[in-house]
Image (cartoon, coloured by chain):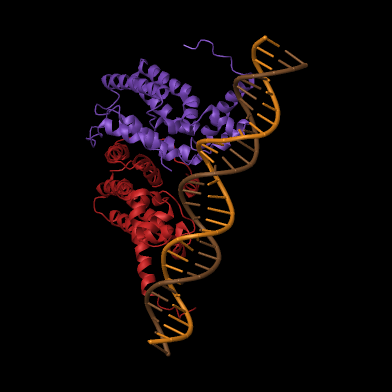
Chain colours: A purple, B red, C orange, D brown
Amino acid sequence: MTPGARRPRADAARNHQRLLDAAAEVFGEAGIDVPMSEVARRAGVGIATLARNFPAREDLVAAVFGAAMTAYADTAAAAAADPDPWRAFCGFIEYVCRIPQRDRGFGQVLTTMFPGVEALESQRQRGLREFIRLVNRAKKAGGLRPDFSPHDLPLIMLATGGVTRAGTPALATAADRLIGYLLQACAAGNTAPLPGPPPPRELYRALESSRPA
Amino acid sequence: MTPGARRPRADAARNHQRLLDAAAEVFGEAGIDVPMSEVARRAGVGIATLARNFPAREDLVAAVFGAAMTAYADTAAAAAADPDPWRAFCGFIEYVCRIPQRDRGFGQVLTTMFPGVEALESQRQRGLREFIRLVNRAKKAGGLRPDFSPHDLPLIMLATGGVTRAGTPALATAADRLIGYLLQACAAGNTAPLPGPPPPRELYRALESSRPA
DNA sequence: CAAAATCTGGAAGGGGTCTTCCGTTTCACC
DNA sequence: GGTGAAACGGAAGACCCCTTCCAGATTTTG
């Protein structure tokens, strides 16, 4: 319907893009909870323009991180197709855990569910599906312990995210060390039983409301 | 000096205690960043009374968690004296990691430095000293991997704290599973090299400013 | 029991963020 | 170029939090 959509004005399109760029920059440095006015300031536009383009913070987050979430799912798919599943598993975990070091905002997005944002959640689910494939292959190949659960992934994300949160370089190297511990714990040699995982449904529901102050 | 400190009025003492009780309750449930007005409301006093007793949030935090921090250091000392160091190490790590499940506020306090609060920091240091003793004994006894650093303790605290933060029961069982992974990674059987730890000075400095929004 | 010292609660003030409104400016089309 | 529609930016309003002040209530003391 409504095929006669007018071409948007040039300055409007430019401002839209500027806002996206500024938001990507600010969110990456300081997380997705920065004041909206700071985004507008960096974009060189007024706060009203920001509010008109993205009425809610969630809209801006979705627009900024849609591509990153797709790239994340693509990376999972590539890992799942790797001929050496255990190596790919380790590489993927490292990749995921370093995300909040590179982009603090995307780190938050990865550990927060946005039930209303289809673009984000569909890619997240695709990433999880690919990760499940990767896990199964890594178990079959023998590198990964059999009782590893694919739903330990958000757990690992939360853990390293908690370390990286403050964002200083010292904590970044600390997070790398944590990854080292965790990967060794995931190796097939470990046979001691683990506490059971929580029911996935509850786990993911908990992630929906996990953006506190 | 000033030896003639008058006995405080009975109602003032009662309100002081009420504030401490209410703060312990609220901080435990919702963390140490809850609005001060909420503390006053639960204590059944006005906000002015709260402000007079504890001018800064830090003062209230110190008063509420001083005893808990001492208990933490005591627990570390008991573990360091345990005849079975590796078992004591595992027990202590579990104890520490479950703290934010039981008391969200104290979990935050444990991973945040309060440079101005002697009562808190001296006990924290005592706890760390005892933990270092425990680590050395556990390494000698052979249960703990030799390249474990005592300064991995805040790392582990941050990691489990990050998982527990949302506070739902599902995430509590998830945190237990994380502890399971980490303890297995700490066992002496693991010989794969770890990424080096960050310089302790920088690490602890990073913890001084880690109470973001 | 009354005076003095102490303590109390609410209201006002200041800082911060987000949303909404509106007069003005800029662009696209003819 | 001129004109109408679209987009702009800043100000105003609402909300939340913390701090400070003060008139009134309460307890202690002689």
User: In the rendered image, which quarter is residue A8 located in?
Assistant: top right
Q: Nearer the viewer, residue A55 or B26?
A: A55
Q: Nearer the viewer, residue A140 or A55?
A: A55
Whole-percent x, y for residue A23 in the image: 54, 30
Left or right, B50 with respect to A5, comes to: left
Q: Is residue A161 above or below residue B55?
A: above
List x then y, in percent, for residue B81. 28, 56
- Where does residue B203 sit, x and y in percent of width and height? 47, 45
Residue at left offset 37%, top offset 59%? B64
Q: Is residue B94 above or below residue B68?
A: above
Q: Quadrant of residue B9?
A: bottom left
Q: Nearer the viewer, residue C14 or B145?
A: C14
Residue A128 in picture, x, y percent from top left = 34, 23
Residue located 40% across and 77% down the image: B7
Comparing B114 with B42, the one in front is B42
Q: Residue at x 46, y 65 (%)?
A: B52
Q: Is residue B14 visible?
A: yes
Q: Please state if D18 lies on the left or on the right of A42 as rendered.
A: left
Query: Exactly how many numbered labels are in the figure?
Result: 0
* Residue B192 appears in the rendering: no
